[in-house]
Image: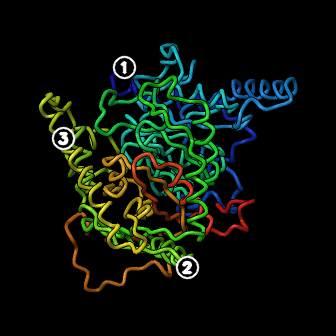
Amino acid sequence: MGATESWKLAGEHKRNALLALIPSEWRLAQPLPSPEDVPDLRKGTIQSYLSCREISCLHEIFFQAALRDADACDLYIKKHGKPIGALHGLPVSLKDVVNIKDVDTTMGFVGLVGNATSISRESQIATLLRRLGAVLFVKTSVPTGSFTIDTFNNIIEHTANPCNRRFNVGGSSGGEGGLLALKGSPLGMGTDIGGSVRVPAVWNGCYGIRPSTGRVPYEGTSSLVDGQTAIPFVLGFMAPLPEAITHAMRSLLSLSPWMNDPLVHEIPWREEIYTQFKESASGVFQLSFGIMRTDHYVNVQPPVQRAMDIVVNKLKSLGHSKRAVTIDGGKAFHEAIKLSGEPPHRVDLGLVDAAKPVPATVFGLLPQPEASATEINGINIAIRDYRRSYLEYWNSTAEITGTGRPVDVFLMPVAPTPAPVRGKVRYFGYSTLANVLDFTACGIPVTEVQKDIDRYDDEDYVPLNELDKLVHDDYDPVLSDGTPVGIQVVGRRLQEEKVLAIAEVIGNTVNDLSERGNIKL
């Protein structure tokens, strides 16, 4: 048997083993109609639910262990008359990179299938969630290496976007985004190094936070770039509702995670800040918002522009002020990709074969030369200088806000597009900015593409560059009709309470609160 046949069989075996763990009564009759006939599986055309079989969003399933944990929760509350913790009995899904004892962590590599026995201890985040009473039940899909926006690997193959199966689910926390869109989990955990929480959250109509480094424990969680500290991965919650993320963050920080992870800052949840900005954002006190509609490198498509307009107009109606913000023309994106050494044009120009997405798109066909200590120092200095420049610029906005203070947060796209067709992820400079600057950022769903409204009106369009033209020409309002569209709220470093408070108000303002009991999917 050749090497190709060997890894293909190993991937197929793992895939079939996962499917076998899904109870037959949870599955839809096969074959399903094609994506062209029924693009949106969330709607009632077929049924109101799916299993992971239809979108392939799960890497690991441990329902039996979860049921035992749920029984233990029941016994505890019966015996003690109180819940274990603030997440008592709540099912929580985790991105594949979070280590769970006796469960594989493959990061999408076929060669790591069956490595559960080598995992001697769980990730700190898993341990803390259990202490809060959470019931961990699945681990969700990632791209190979957990490092790109298109969730595909040779184990589970493509994870489809349940909003439209022809479209990209996002990544690298794509499985989480897809599962949440299907109401398959009330709360999930992803990781973010360049938008990997916010992009799949927004592309699936959900919320997702990218906390600053050192707020949520990463200890014991797998990473392909372990030891890279310039722009590290961070763990962030994802959920259909912003209040779920706030509750999870508040609960997690109540356990003093800095006692078990040396890289976590000793900053408890600051309820007074959360309350202050929740009231202020609701219109009690005027806030000032920086508005970044374009980075002048790649312009956004019409539905993203409309989502920005919706949020800005709602905030204006609440009495808040707004000021335009000038961003860096994509420099943050290019600073970030220097860390892995991959050729930027392979991602920028979207030259990924939609039928054959491969890790080489990001990491190159062969291992890249290792950076020297001098080169690493140079990158770190450049990032530090870049952050200082942004700090000075942010502070300077106090002169133009009218409040006497710098802008409180700024609003910007998460990506220049709603979820694109598979293989058409052209650019993620909008999401990478927060990672380079280590800003707190939260993705927010705002609306859906409306084919009759979201159209270009630019007969005199002049592309900014080749990439801008590709993004412009990719847009098909008919094909994209009904797909989620969102933006992000970006605050300074370690401003999770402030960002979440404002995100809640924006989310509740732009979405119909009458539907909160039955979330519109």
For the N terminus, the image quarter is: top left
- SS at mark 2? helix
Question: Looking at the image, can residue 10 be seen?
Answer: no
- SS at mark 1? loop
Amino acid beneath label 2? Ser
Is tag 2's residue or tag 3's residue first in the polypeptide sequence? 2
Residue marked by disc 2: 317
Q: Is residue 324 above or below residue 251?
A: below
Q: Are marks 2 and 3 in contact (CB under 8 Å)?
A: no
Q: CA distance from mark 2 to mark 3?
A: 42 Å
Amino acid beneath label 3? Ile
Q: Are marks 2 and 1 in contact (CB under 8 Å)?
A: no
* Residue at 26% in and 45% down: 336
Q: Front-most of 281 and 400?
A: 400
Residue density around tag 1, few if under 14, some if 14–19, many if 20 or more, within 10 Å: few
Amino acid beneath label 1? Met
* Residue at 50% in and 30% down: 98
Q: Which mark is residue 170?
A: none
Residue marked by disc 1: 1
* Residue at 17% in and 29% down: 370
- SS at mark 3? helix
Residue reaching furthest to the front: 404
Is tag 2's residue or tag 1's residue first in the polypeptide sequence? 1
Location of residue 421 in the rendering, given as x and y in whole percent from the top left corner: 42, 59
Residue density around tag 3, few if under 14, some if 14–19, many if 20 or more, within 10 Å: few
Is tag 3's residue or tag 1's residue first in the polypeptide sequence? 1
Q: Is residue 247 above or below residue 421?
A: above
Residue marked by disc 3: 381
